[in-house]
Amino acid sequence: MSVFVLCSVLFIGLVNSASAQDAPDEAPKAEAPMNEAAPAPKAEMSAPYNGLVLTLNDQWSLKFSGQLNTYFVANMQEGKDAIFGVQNGLLPASLNVSPMFKASSAVTISGNFGLYLGIPASGVDNSKSNVALDFSAVDIRSLSFSIATPGGTFFLGRDFGQFGLDAILNDISLLGVGGNYSFANPQHTTLGGIGYGYIYADRLVQINYTTPTFGNTSVTVGIYDAINDFGATSIATGIIGWHAKAKTDQKFGENVGLYISATFLAQYRSVLSGMAIGWDAFLKFNVYGFSLIGYIYGGDGIGDVGLMVGGTKTNGSGKVVAASSLGYYGQLSYTIKMAMPLTIGVFYGASTIDQGTGGKSDVKASTRITGSVALAVLPYLILRAEFTNQSEQKTLPAAAPKANIVNVGATFAF
């Protein structure tokens, strides 16, 4: 199966409909939609990001939010000619429409419709780029609603899962390019740091319950329709996965904050005839313009790029068994607060997976380092330049070879 189809299936709608409840910088209010477009990091913007809200009456409102981005990207591989392109970054363009109904002073029902598209003309399957008379595909990848009550919040529908979400939402290249899986044939996304320190959260069909917040701490538990192996010819149905998340977001005055989260995920995988299990932990510490992030994940049978993509090997008897994976990243950034906020930062991440066969261990690592500079020249317009050095991605080496990547471009958020 074409790696570009993999890009389409896994990443076309990346992050833009991510839950505001899971973004440390965007704690939800009782009346806010639980799932909405992931905004630009607050530190990079010179005005509050709230989307465009149309108030219809005392009970009904309609919110529009999203972003557009375009980058010039230069990909340089050893022993090969440089490849240049104009394309989307880690995020495709997005438009999120969120109707909200305030049933009472204590109960709010809100929904989200997420539309995703990219600037390359790539047809309906995203397997080719900029063919004459072709077009850019539009995909609806988020269909969900939430019910917020004093006793907690219920979330129902299709959207990003709990595992790995904080990691990607806080990647310094979220609104940039980062690593690049589509260097020769630009698609709707470059895939950024996925497979280089964290696993893609993926969009799950799920039902979750989140407790009320006590001391800025809450717990989410839920079930989801289990993901089948990518490219599987035999599809298992009627299987439920489980996930959970605990998080706390503490403020110590105006300039110091600490956010910590941990998640767990488990589901049956048909190729293993057994369970796949994953866990992660995330920490973000903000102090006087500096932001320090640490993240780690591990698991068996979950893969190292997307959930249930790879993550298997053979034992001494030739039986397919779960491959262990472990990944982490560290990130440091500093924002100079002025009329046009300037954010500089560096990211280092690594994903490892045991690809040994015949019962042997053979741990392979995929690494990425990115330096980023972002300037908010206008309240919702961010200019960005990045340099990335990425190793070969061990699960998808043909898609993401060893390379140096330079990109310059802009993002407009609304």
Image (cartoon, grey):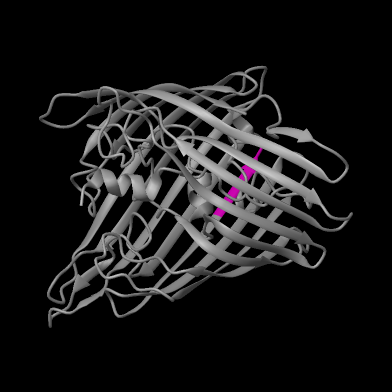
How far across and how far down the image is residue 75, in percent? 25, 28
Q: In the image, is residue 35 above or below residue 163?
A: above
Residue stretch rendered in magenta on the structure: 283-287
Q: Which residue is rendered at x = 34% and y = 45% of the image?
A: 8
Question: Would residue 365 be visible to someone looking at this image?
Answer: yes
Q: Is residue 2 left or right of residue 190?
A: left
Q: Which residue is rendered at x = 14% and y = 70% of the image?
A: 357
Q: Is residue 238 left or right of residue 221?
A: left
Question: Would residue 31 be visible to someone looking at this image?
Answer: no
Q: In the image, is residue 239 above or below residue 367?
A: below
Q: Which residue is rendered at x = 51% and y = 68% of the image?
A: 224
How far across and how far down the image is residue 412, in percent? 55, 24
Magenta-drawn stretch, dominant element (helix, strand or loop): strand
Q: Which residue is rendered at x = 24% and y = 66% of the image?
A: 233
Quadrant of the frame with the C terminus: top right
360 or 382, which lies in front?
A: 382
Q: Quadrant of residue 226?
A: bottom left
